Image (spheres, helix red, strand yellow):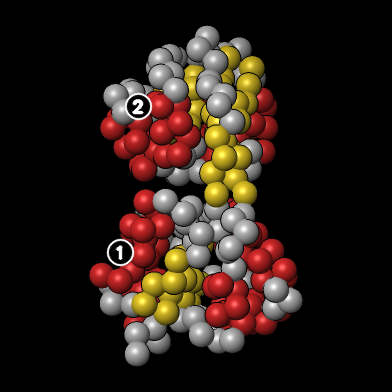
Amino acid sequence: MKPTVAVFRPADERLREAVDLLASLGVDPLGDPMLAVAPTGAVPREEAAFVIFTSKTGVELVADAGWPASGTVCAIGDSTAAALRDHGYPVDVVPSEFSSSGLVARLQSEVAGARVEVARSDHGSDVLLDGLNDAGAYVHETILYELTRPADSGVSAERAATGDLAGAAFTSSLTVEHFLAAAAERGVREAAIAGVNDAVVGCIGEPTRETAEQAGIAVDVVPSEASFEALARGVVERVRDR
């Protein structure tokens, strides 16, 4: 019987692609949609000197709204940068470290006195806003979409609680939080944590690792490349090693 690896993505093509990738790697994928995207209809201000995007989802929403590129366009991560290019937008800055702190470090010598627009979800880290403000920028945040937990999510928490997971791939801090909330809702929070700690746990980056570890989840895999493919391959490889 193939080992089961849980993956947490929005219930759209990202979850389908993640499930297909895990299946191609020889495991039994368990897709649990821990995120649902609710667009706000807002678009970034056009007079900013710098415009920052933090996700592929945000890029797709502004492209659908017909937002005209303006200022220096910044992307946190290769997938966000690729989405911008796919929609015909320029990409001027991608930090070498794909994180809020990495982008702050990249821009801190350039943004003093400048208007900076941060376009992202309602669950963005304060690290980005605080860091840019401390660097002297005039920062405005536009909430492009809200992230909620689908009502039918949580089967992975039940499977973890019964010891049926060989691996779990967390793609953001919010997927960790929603996994734990779903487990608590079902009355299996402690058992689910114990279950994933007996499995291979992968996190897509350091902020996600920190969230997991603060909740008592031991993290085994954090890929050097912040992409789902790298995360999935890292988790599956460790599962096979066990």
Instruction: Quadrant for the C terminus, please.
Output: bottom left
Left or right side of 122 for 21: left
Q: Is residue 224 visible?
A: no
Q: Circle 2 — which element?
A: loop
Q: Badge 1 is on which residue?
A: 21
Residue for point 62% across, 82% down? 161
Answer yes or no: do the residues labelled 2 and 1 have beta carbons within 8 Å? no
Outermost left residue = 24
Q: Is residue 130 visible?
A: yes
Residue for point 66% across, 66% down? 182
Residue for point 53% across, 22% down? 43
Q: Circle 1 — which element?
A: helix
**Residue 106: image location, x then y, percent:** 48, 32
Relative height, residue 99 to residue 228 (above, below): above
Relative height, residue 75 to residue 242 (above, below): above
How far apart are the two marked residues, 2 and 1, measured between alpha carbons?
28 Å
- Which disc is residue 91 wearing? 2
Residue for point 60% across, 74% down? 157
**Residue 238: image location, x then y, percent:** 39, 77
**Residue 227: image location, x then y, percent:** 38, 53
- Type of amino acid under label 2: Val
Earlier in the chain: of badge 2 and badge 1, it is 1
Left or right side of 15 for 196: right
